[in-house]
Image (tube, rainbow, N blue to C red):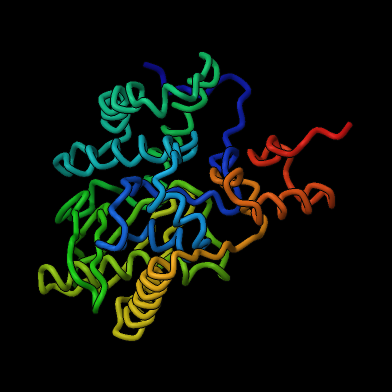
Amino acid sequence: MEFEAPEGEVIDLDADGPADGAIDVDLQVEPSLKHLSPSSAGMYQQCARKWKFRYLDRLPDPPGPAALTGTFAHRALELLLQEPADNRTEARAKELARVAWPETAEDADYQALELDDKAARHFRWQGWTAIKGLWKLENPALVDVVATEQRVDTMIGEVPFRGIVDRLDNEPDGQIVADYKSGRAPSPRYREGRLAQVLLYAAAIAAETGVVPVRARLLYLGQRIIETPVTDEAVGAAVETLTATWNNVQSDCARNEFEPTTGPLCAWCPFASQCPEGMAEVTKRHKAGRVRLDAPAVALLPVAS
């Protein structure tokens, strides 16, 4: 198993993804209306029609290479942070990446990519680049880990909420909720929206354990840390948005009406072929030259005669 860089290769962790390339590894599909997770709430906020296709109709939505790379990196880092502090070295991380690799290699979604040898080496190198990127942010040997992959299943306000917290850490002033990200770090404009996820995790931890974390932290591997104090005001804003989403989901389900939100992401939507409004948006953008030609929905457009 090799994790060395392919010769002459330039690594772009977002090469396969749209927009900000954010990767979340909470990939399980949950029954509709029983609860919200950060991923399902985020998808509804992005597009209610897309949420319906994924969570009600259960249409196939296989993760692409970027998402699978993120899953692989998360698993290796989970194993690393479960090690005794003195063992959390880059050399040990590479060993654990090799331990974690069969889970990815044997996954049906990875096999469906049908990568040739060169592409498979590139995939592994991207994963290792993300793993190694942790050392640009912190020395993992100095982290006081409380838990990794902590599942939460609780009520936040009036909303049944589920999720998986990558890490709970102890620092001198209290607990920290930390979440790994292997996509591109957001610009200041989108910072608040990204932090909402870890603020909700902080609220869930407080509801389940009675311990209120003092900070919520996003670790953008190889880039930078983005964090915020866990204040009543910040948590209240995140919970208010979650509650509005929950109420809107229930209303849409009762009416069986799910309005699409069209825009540049329609070209990357796995359900574009099922959505006339989305394909109309892709067609318009394609004619205007405002869509990447490698976007999947572009291949669905009729070939000009």
The residue at the far right in this view is 305
- The answer to whether 29 appears left or right of 156 in the picture is right
**Residue 237 placed where, x, y %?**
38, 81
**Residue 60 placed where, x, y %?**
44, 39
- Comparing 175 with 30, the one in front is 30
- The answer to whether 85 appears left or right of 56 in the picture is left
Image quadrant where residue 202 sits: bottom left
Q: Residue at x 18, y 55 (%)?
A: 144
**Residue 276 placed where, x, y %?**
65, 52
**Residue 185 placed where, x, y %?**
51, 56
Q: Residue at x 29, y 27 (%)?
A: 103
Q: Is residue 2 above or below residue 144?
A: above
- Comparing 162 with 71, the one in front is 162
The residue at the far front in this view is 255
- Comparing 17 with 124, the one in front is 17
Q: Is residue 117 above or below residue 144?
A: above
Q: Residue at x 60, y 46 (%)?
A: 272
Q: Quadrant of the N terminus?
A: top left
The residue at the far bottom in this view is 233
Q: Residue at x 46, y 22 (%)?
A: 4
- The answer to whether 191 appears left or right of 178 in the picture is right
Q: How many marks?
A: 0
Q: Quadrant of the C terminus?
A: top right
The residue at the far left in this view is 209
